[in-house]
Amino acid sequence: TIVVYNNHTGQMERTAALVPTPAPATGIAAHCQSRLLSAVERIAPYNDRLSWIPYAIDACHLSLTEGRIAAILSTSPPLAGHLAALRLKRRYGVPWVADFRDPLLGNPTRTRRLGLLYDRAIQHMVFSAADAVLAVTDSMKDEWVQQYPQWRDKFHLVWNGFDPAERFPEQPVPPRPFTLLLHAGTLYRDRHPNRLMASLARLLTAGKIAPGSVRLRLLGPIEDLAGLRAQPAAKLLESIGGLEIIEQMLPRAEAIEQTVTSDYLLLLDVLNSQGAAY
C-alpha cells in the first residue's frame, strides 16, 4: 500500500484503489515494466508483489508532478509498497515515511536460501532513503538501532494496534462455570495454538483438569481452520466445550468487551533468528 498526503485538501489518498489500471498514456510502459518485474520475481527468494510497482508509480505520478503531495507513506508486507515509494522518493524528492508491519531481517517467515542477502540489501536501501521508518514493537526498533546506529534518529515506534494512552473500561468478569482463555486476532502461519491445545488435551486425559472447566476461545480469522480442527487435540477440546472458535472480525467495541471480560488473554508468537520475540 502507498498513501500520499494531499497538501491542498489535507486528505490521505490511497493508490491501492487506482491500480493496476493506469492511464492509457502510460499504461503500455507500466505493463512492460510489470512483466519484467514478474520475471525477476520468479528467481527472487519471495513473492513481494514486484509487478505492482510500475502501476503504483503511475498512479502517483500526476499528483506528484502537480505539486499537490506533501509526503508519502508506504507500508509492508509486501515489500512492493516500499520499493515503489523508494522510486518516487528518488524521482520527486518528497518526504517519505516507511512503515514496517513485520521486520525483514530476522523474520521467521523469510528464511529461504539467499533471502538474507536479498532482505539485507532492500532494508539498507529503504533505511538510507526514507526520512522516517516506523516499527510496531520496541524490539524491532532496538534491533534497527543496533544494526544501523547512523540512522537511529529515523526510527520511530508506533505500537501495532495499541495506544498506551487508551484506557479500557473496567468491567467485572461475569460468573461462568469455566475459566476463559481468549485469543483475539488473526491466526496465521506459525501463530497457531497447536501446542497449547495439545497441552490442554494431555491435562484433560490425565485428569489434571476437569472437562468443561477451561475454555479456549479463538476470536478472529484463522488460516487453515480445517487443518486446525482436524488435530486430535482440537477435536477433543471441541467435543467437551473446551474450544470455541469465532472466526469473524468484531466491531472494536465488542472486541474490547470480550477482552476485558475474559479471565486470561493469550498471546501467540514466534521467535526470529536472533531469538527476540515479536
Image (cartoon, rainbow, N blue to C red):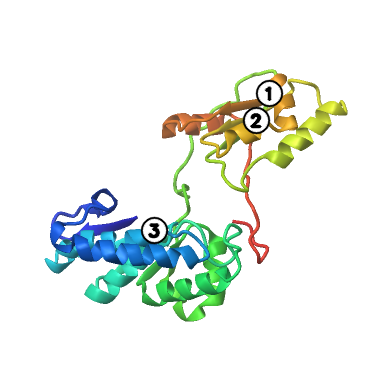
Between residue 56 and residue 132, name the one nearer to us: 56
Q: Secondary structure at mark 1?
A: helix
Q: Residues within 10 Å of mark 3 (few under 14, many from 20)?
A: many
CB of mark 2 within 8 Å of CB of mark 1? yes
Residue 251 in view, yes or no: yes
Q: Residue at x 47, y 48 (%)?
A: 162
In the displayed structure, 19 sits above or below 39; it is: above
Q: Amino acid at mark 1?
A: Glu
For residue 6, side relative to residue 147 (left or right): left
Q: In whole angstroms, how far apart are the C-alphas of marks 1 and 3?
A: 38 Å
For residue 17, side relative to residue 219 (left or right): left
**Residue 25 in which image quadrant:** bottom left
Percent coordinates x, y for residue 112 in the rendering: 60, 64
For residue 109, side relative to residue 30 (left or right): right
Q: Which residue is mark 1?
A: 238
Q: Amino acid at mark 3?
A: Thr
> Looking at the figure, which quarter contains the C terminus?
bottom right
Q: In whole angstroms, how far apart are the C-alphas of marks 2 and 1?
A: 9 Å
Extreme bottom residue here? 150
Q: Which residue is mark 3?
A: 75
Q: Which residue is mark 2?
A: 229
Q: Residue at x 71, y 26 (%)?
A: 235
